[in-house]
Image (cartoon, grey):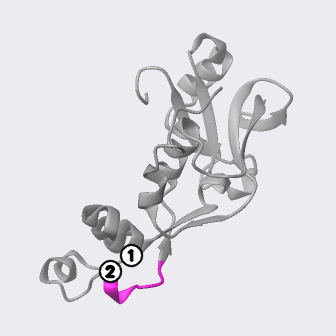
Amino acid sequence: MLGEYSQYRQGTFNPALNLLDNSYNIALNPGAAKFVFANYRELSSLTLVPTDTTTKVEYSLVGLRDLSPSVARRALAFNCRVEPVELITGSISVDDFPHRRIVLADLTAFLLVFTEVFEGSNMEFASVVDNGGQLVLEPSNSGISVIRLSKNTVVENPRDLLNHDRLYRRKG
């Protein structure tokens, strides 16, 4: 549960892109997912963010360092596969990757659900179909809210996202 009023999940409409049979963390507990999808109207808010949407946003590693050195170190370890000992000793740093851009899917999903900082985001809807035990989301005219991005975005300076004029709760 994110905050006290909303739930968001990542996944994809294209089953070929799923790592598991079910997207949106459905594989963790298919019974619970079926319950949530059957009763989503009872929730104050349920918004899905497809993985292929979250991967359309890339963040500059240098820009992340300027915003949060700890996030940049995490990105070096996870995204750039830098060994912890190299980070601790300083033998490798963000400066060794001056043009590296990384995907931060969770951050992007959060920003898409709760703000309007990315141009080209739009709200769509999906319905759930049980395809022999695999829950498949299909585009629909009504149903569960889904946020999509129409274009790829590079965030060179993540600090710009904190501009108070653009960082406000998504109108829904």
- Mark 1 and 2 residues: CB-CB less than 8 Å, in contact? yes
Question: How many neighbours does mark 2 have within 10 angstroms: few (below 14), some (14-19), or many (20 or more)?
Answer: many
User: Is tag 1's residue or tag 2's residue first in the polypeptide sequence?
Assistant: 1
Q: Secondary structure at mark 2?
A: helix
Q: Nearer the viewer, mark 1 or mark 2?
A: 1
Magenta residues, dominant SS class = loop
Number of numbered discs present? 2
The image quarter in which residue 27 lies: top right
Residue hosting label 2: 94
Residue 126's tag is none
Q: Which sits in the foreground, 73 or 172? A: 172
Find the residue positioned furthest to the left: 89
Q: Which sits in the foreground, 38 or 66? A: 66
Is residue 38 found left or right of 59 in the rendered image?
A: right
| Distance in Å between CA atoms under marks 1 and 2 | 6 Å
Residue 62 in percent (x, y) is at 39, 75
Quadrant of the image containing the C terminus: top right
Residue occupying image coordinates x 57% and y 48%: 117
Q: Secondary structure at mark 1?
A: helix
Residue 100 in percent (x, y) is at 47, 80
Find the residue positioned furthest to the front: 165
Residue hosting label 1: 62
Region rendered in magenta: 95-100
Name which residue type carries label 1. Val
Is residue 125 found left or right of 98 in the rendered image?
A: right
Is residue 16 found left or right of 47 in the rendered image?
A: right
